[in-house]
Image (cartoon, grey):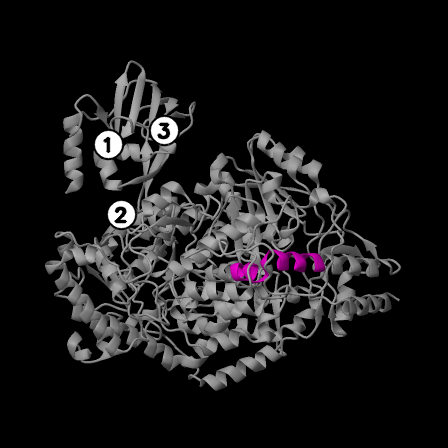
Amino acid sequence: MKTIFEQSVAGREGCWPCEGAAEESYIPKELLRGGEAGLPSVSELDVVRHFTRLSQRNYSVDSNFYPLGSCTMKYNPKFTEVVAGLPGFTRLHPVLPQLRGAGGLCQGALEVMYEIEQLLCEITGMAAYTMHPMAGAHGELTGVMLMAAYHRDKGNKKTKIIVPDSAHGTNPASAATAGYEVVSVESKDGIVDPAALEKVLDDEVAGMMMTCPNTLGLFERNLPEVVRMLRKVDALLYYDGANLNAIMGKMRVGDVGFDIVHWNVHKTLATPHGGGGPGSGPVGVSDRLVDFLPISRVRKREDGRFFLDYDCPKSIGYVAPFYGNFGVYLKAYAYVLRLGGTGLRRASENAVLAANYMRKRLSGHFEVPYDRICMHEFVASASPQAKDGVHALDFAKGLLDRGYHAPTIYFPLIVPEALMIEPTETENKETLDKFCDDLIELAELAKTNPEALTSAPVNLPVTRLDETRAARSMELTDDL
Amino acid sequence: MIPEDLLYAKTHEWVLIEGDVATVGITQFAQEQLGDLTFVEMPEVGDTFEAGTEMGSVESVKAASEIYAPVSGEVIEINEELEDAPEKVNEEPYGSGWIVKFRIKGDPEGLLDAQGYASAVESEAH
Amino acid sequence: MLAVIGVDSVDDLFAEITEEMRPKSFDIPEGLSEMEVLSKLEAMAAKNATDRVSFLGAGFYDHYIPAAVDALTMRGEFYTAYTPYQPEASQGTLQAIFEYQTAVARLLGMECANASVYDGGTALYEALMMAVRKTKRRKVVVSEALNPIYRVMLGSYTTNLDVELVTVPYKDGQTNLDGLKDALDDSTAAVLVQNPNFFGSINDFTELFAAAKAVKAVSIMSAYPVLQTLLKTPGEMGADIAVAEGQSLGLPLSFGGPYLGIMTCTKTMVRQMPGRIVGRTGDTEGRTGYVLTLQAREQHIRRQRATSNICSNQSLCALRALVHMCALGEQGLRRAARVSIERAHACAERLTAIDGVDMLTKGPFGNEFAVTLPVNAFEIIDKLTERGFVPGFPLGRYFEGLENGLLVACTEKTSEEQIGIFAEMLRGALK
């Protein structure tokens, strides 16, 4: 498909934003650019056709089952878009609360921030939240900065953060970004092994980052022991909220001893992912970390009015220019209000039910390395099929051909040929069954006609793409 | 096959020592593990390294791996052809895919011969 | 389903969560109907006064957004897709990102762009870290005339890192070019400046960037995308990295987010760039297609050695920016920029005609400028806000000694009539 730049015709005009010729130049010539930028000159209809056609070259939750493990691709209820589009929110300039009296102009927005913080505190059992981090990894970075502030305040000399080998890549990257040395700890039987942890745990450990259930979809049974071990060396425990969809109403991370947690609002709380973002990654903390939360903090006066508190002497400072992705967590707030406590608990129950059902239906056709009760997702493996030359990648492409988005296959690193499947609670049984039937059929096809899989997909706008060429030739814009 | 006339580091670099000059590349095994290379990050001429420290990296589409200096010394030449043709490392890892040349400082230590490296690879594969 | 799994109840699936790990409380109100949620939130939205005429900018501007932006970017096929990990099923998102990269690279006169980061401040921090990695130096020279909101972010992000920020004070409402040049030496990793600067004044940094190049430091400029259709580009000035807050390209103000961190750089810096990058390639049939590329820089492959921890970005905001630029086109965007500049100049003329009100911004400016008032700016803001006008941003909030300074922004949405009323109100308030 041609790029929009290739459709440009000199002199063709698009939307007319405003009247006013304004030819007079207020800026001396030497401060102006040499020529035009080269943005497209196209009509509005050209733009509408182009982007409509582009959209049709995508799989999405609205059009396809999307069991992408670790990404919680649940359905995004449409009414939350109406909420986020209310002009009373979209037209609000972010510096208003800094204008003294003008804080009175944004009471509704401050109330949203206050209320969602309260709800997230209760769902996870934490003492306080910041809504500022703008994605999960940003929440992780904020969390690690909070750890650093805590230890600095206590005069602790800490240099290391422990990360299980099954962790998301963002965990070690976030720890390193905040200046820590990363120590990996091996899993045993799919979960954190206290004996292995003992070996790497010492006074220099600032904290440990975990997710529970972990990336294999397994519940971390040794959690209470891990908490006790970390407390002994004054190390903090961080909860990666990527997998919160499994445990709402079933376990609160604050109750079991986590000090820091981030949410991926674009996963668990149903805000759409937009092809890669924007997300929102609120961070909750236990009592001993509240003073270190980012500036500013939303507070409620006795008269019921809200204000932003900028007087936070122990704070880690600013991780966002303002209050994070307000327009995103506004949708999450609407979602939580709609589901309520019972609805959230039921969401987790149904997510876990769906994952276990699929696990059972597929085991026997695929290797399931940890074939026991899983939580909201599970990892199957195409290792047996790979011996005959059909890899997880080929199954992924075969599924694309049948109209499904593929499971996660590049992750977790500790399972070769992984097919990480997360159905979520919003898919019905018929969809789960059809997917399982089709995947089982592909497993048969791998035996009888492997070529059909290794050459897939053939039903999409393009076949497999040459990624090596892309990396070597580096065509990163229409000009390079 | 692992050439007999070279020495090897456990981190999969090979070394050809000629007088006080060492030519360094990555082994056949290493390039196979990585797949088609898309980029070789090389040090600059004049940089000095202690043996065992990181001096560059190689990247493929799905993996990246650090290159460690197998000997101590100063970089006197880099293989500039790799900047536009990293695939040479895949095609001829022991030939035109060499990466840097060092002027060696001190005696090389802890390097393996072909047989020693073969058994190191063997044990890593299992 | 339970029978297939081989358990009796859903509770059995959660048996591993033992009694000691169960919630101590879970006091969340019962769910509401869609209609009830909507009316609750409509009531909350109504508590926000968005009917005020606003001259607020400070890096975040209320430009007109063509209707096509919402209509196209709200399509579920874009909106409810994940990161394009399966390229064959994501050509829509991938090609759009490629076109976005092209558009912002052209706008800023740079060679490469990434798929976005969270916001303009994070983009600046990531640019700083690119320079630190590339030069293996730790001193970073920062202009005080850079948006103070970003300066505090840089300070927070680098607290735990071995990086030294050297801030060069502004001079007479101007970026202090000589001071910045003097601060450069052979231990400098980067110099960070903004154009137009926080006070609205427009500069040419060509000489400064040449001086940085002479000591092998990296030149980083923060830009304002709408004006960049007219202004000399960071590329033309010789910047190595150019970043911008992309909010003014089709994103509503939305109380601070979601916004868009635009990052562009020269080809020689691209391997230091954080985040996702899309590249063009071909399929097995020879057709053109797009993939995520240079991924070996990223956290899912390199883990703690990655160039950044970023994973989710602001993809949909980047799409909005792209559609916005396409729908307005080069001419539409230039017109919006010109009209905004014209209104700001008209406004400056009206305000400075008032006794005791003087220009603080010196030299050429775009659609934003600062004035000094005879009284504390907060006082005026309080008075005018009560009457339905938010007159601007109080510089005293961040700059000691500028308590009487007011930063005023106009866009093409600011009418001449509003400017007139604003000036009369200010005159009245100062009497």
| Residue nearest the viewer, comparing C22 with C201 | C201
- Can residue C329 be found in the magenta stretch? yes
Q: CA distance from mark 3 to mark 2?
A: 45 Å
Q: Which residues are magenta?
A: C321-339
How busy is the neighbourhood of tag 2: few (under 14 within 10 Å), some, or many (20 plus)?
few
| Three-letter code, disc 1 | Thr
Q: Is residue B6 above or below residue C69?
A: above
- Residue beneath the point at 46% across and 43% down: A480
Residue C314 among those drawn in magenta = no
Specify whether A298 is left or right of C402: left
The dot on residue B81 is: 3
> Regarding mark 2 in the picture, which secondary structure is present there?
helix
The chain identifier of the residue carrying mark 2 reads A
Give the answer, above or below, for where A180 lies relative to A190: above
Residue with the mark numbered 2: A199
Foreground mark, 2 or 1?
1
Q: Which residue is mark 1?
A: B27
The CA distance from mark 1 to mark 3 is 18 Å
As drawn, the residue found furthest toward the left would be A448
